[in-house]
Amino acid sequence: MATDLATIRPGALLRALGRGWRAVRWYVNGLTGQSRYADYVAHERVAHPDRAPLSERDFWRRVYRDQDANPGSRCC
């Protein structure tokens, strides 16, 4: 059954677009690694509530330092 676009309520359309946008943003953040800091902060709050998590800048410095020290299977 085809849906006539004229019968779709504007609010429902906006909610669907919002869900789609959030899904795309979630995927891109996961693909690029941007969600890693949020995951780190969530872990620190649960596992170590007595200490403050690193700032985002310090977190990424540590990640890149560790990557340089332990290159693993990278080609370069």
Image (cartoon, rainbow, N blue to C red):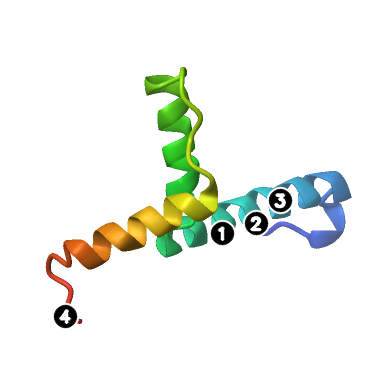
Q: Residues within 10 Å of mark 3 (few under 14, many from 20)?
A: few
Could you give the CA–CA distance between mark 4 and mark 3, rounded to whole angstroms?
A: 39 Å
Q: Secondary structure at mark 2?
A: helix
Type of amino acid at the residue the image marks with label 2: Trp
Q: Is 15 positioned to the left or the right of 20 in the image?
A: right
Q: Quadrant of residue 68?
A: bottom left
Residues at circles 4 and 1 in contact by the CB criterion of under 8 Å? no
Residues at circles 2 and 3 in contact by the CB criterion of under 8 Å? yes
Could you give the CA–CA distance between mark 4 and mark 1, rounded to whole angstroms?
A: 29 Å
Which residue, given by chain and number where applicable, does mark 4 sit on?
75
Type of amino acid at the residue the image marks with label 4: Cys
Residue, x 56% and y 59% (percent of image)?
24
Which residue, given by chain and number where applicable, does mark 1 sit on?
24
Which residue, given by chain and number where applicable, does mark 2 sit on?
21
Q: Secondary structure at mark 4?
A: loop
Residue 9 point in image, percent of width and height: 85, 47
Which residue, given by chain and number where applicable, does mark 3 sit on?
18
